[in-house]
Amino acid sequence: MAIKTKYLTVIGLEVHAQLKTETKLFCKCSTKFGAKPNANTCPVCMGYPGVLPVLNEKAVEYAIKAGLALGCEIDPNCKFDRKQYFYPDLPKGYQISQFDKPICNGGEITIFKDKVVRLERIHMEEDAGKLVHASEDSADRLHGSDYSLVDLNRAGTPLIEIVSKPDISSAEEAIAYVKELRKILMAIDVCDGNMQEGSLRCDVNISLHKEGEPYGTRAEIKNVNSFRSIGRAIEYEYKRQSKLLDSGEQVVQETRLFEENSGKTFSMRSKEDSHDYRYFPEPDLVPLAIPKSFIDELKDNQPELPSQKRNRYVSEFSIPEEAAGIIADDNGLAELFENTVAKGSDAAKVANWLTGAVSAYLNNKEINISATKLSAENLSEMLRLIKDGIISDNIAKNSIVEELLEKGGSVQAIVDREGLAQITDPAAIEAIVQEVIDANPKQVEQFKSGNQKIKGFFVGQVMKATEGKASPQLINESLSKLLK
Ligand SMILES: [Zn+2]
């Protein structure tokens, strides 16, 4: 943070990421989002007595992939433990998690180029179910609701919890950290990163202290599930805790809930220590014995990480850092970029289109490039027609690219159908330029008395008369000749 504040902020984040497996962590139920309540359940994830969990190997593979991408040590002999607590969304009365031997230890994430946030660990665990709080005004909140419904579709879904060390010192850093983590997990294809559907959720631990003094007491903020909420929750907590400290009061160690509507945090319960959960080794599952060859194979086949890809685009294709970032961070855009360049298109031009008109369209429609019909074939064709002077940049931008995104197809066919080819006949352009000059004697006078800027006016008039199809180069040549 650039602004100097009275207290230093110490933040550690616990991010829960849902692994992209087809089925749950300990049973065969589907993990698909959006099913009818309790449709994706079975005796195992509903916590019936006498049933046994069976570990999903794919979830272990994804957790290892995440650990390798984040520079962690993988523990091949990690184990599962029972974390006991009572809550209506937890049918077994305990959650299978990992306590003292998590699958990954250490690791780090770099933000803002050189700020390193160290990781404590990554452990695997199953998700709980979901409570839907019903009330007359149908707002889904606990206070004021008439009754609550339990949906166990999410119970047993595989999660990894990525725990950072308290190396984060501002809301900006916290947001950058979660953004980078999300990009990495999406790039290695272990999490879909969909925060709205709860595939990535964040708890924020935050404390304040004065420079040179020991760390303050921390509060844990739950339910911070968007980048905006992370920023708001941290800012609210800074204000709340600094007010307490200013007036000589104590910050209480507790768990607080962030409420999106008000932007405030509320006390939920006093913070539990690990002994409150009475952890013990899960008796229904043996400790893991992950073969070294399995880890080595994953290590050898690691996909390129977003930061590596960004650097490569800058060095290999000499495109600006910002554009490299936008493209590299999106698997679909990156693939389209590389395939289009492989077809011989100029990398800088491809990058310009993807980060300009194409990104604007995607942002506006809130969709990914994979949901469009733009392909390396038609994008490279469009760029070739621009390069050959058949169409202008403006025509491509205003009349072609949107159709390619929506319908795909051949660019030449669109140009022929709509009559979009540039007028490249010098005589035809000269005739139009002459007309424009004749129709605007006042502007001609201004130009002749030294106002060079007025030339743009003439170019604009010719473009208007030709519906943007005149070659700008030819217009300029004619203007220079006829205005003498
Ligand atoms: Zn199940």
Image (cartoon, rainbow, N blue to C red):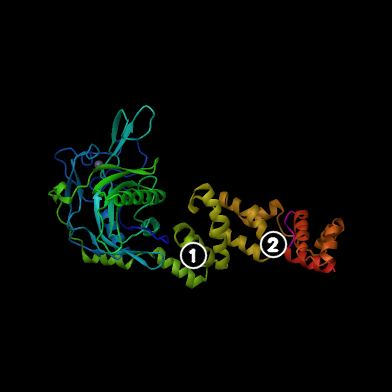
- For ligand 1, the image quadrant comes to top left
Q: Residues within 10 Å of mark 1 (few under 14, many from 20)?
A: many
Residue at the front extreme? 247
Numbered badge on residue 324: 1
The residue stretch that appears in magenta: 467-471
Q: Earlier in the sequence, mark 2 or mark 1?
A: 1
Numbered badge on residue 217: none
Q: Answer whether residue 329 is magenta in the image.
A: no
- Displayed quadrant of residue 143: top left
Magenta stretch: dominant secondary structure: loop
Q: Of the residues shown, which amino acid type is indicated by label 1?
A: Ala
Mark 2 highlights which residue?
Answer: 390
Residue 398: % across, % down: 65, 53
Q: Is residue 316 visible?
A: yes
- Is the residue 14 above or below the residue 444 in the image? above
Q: Secondary structure at mark 2?
A: loop
Q: Answer whether residue 468 is magenta in the image.
A: yes
Which marked residue is nearer to the observer: mark 2 or mark 1?
Answer: 1
Q: Quadrant of the N terminus?
A: bottom left
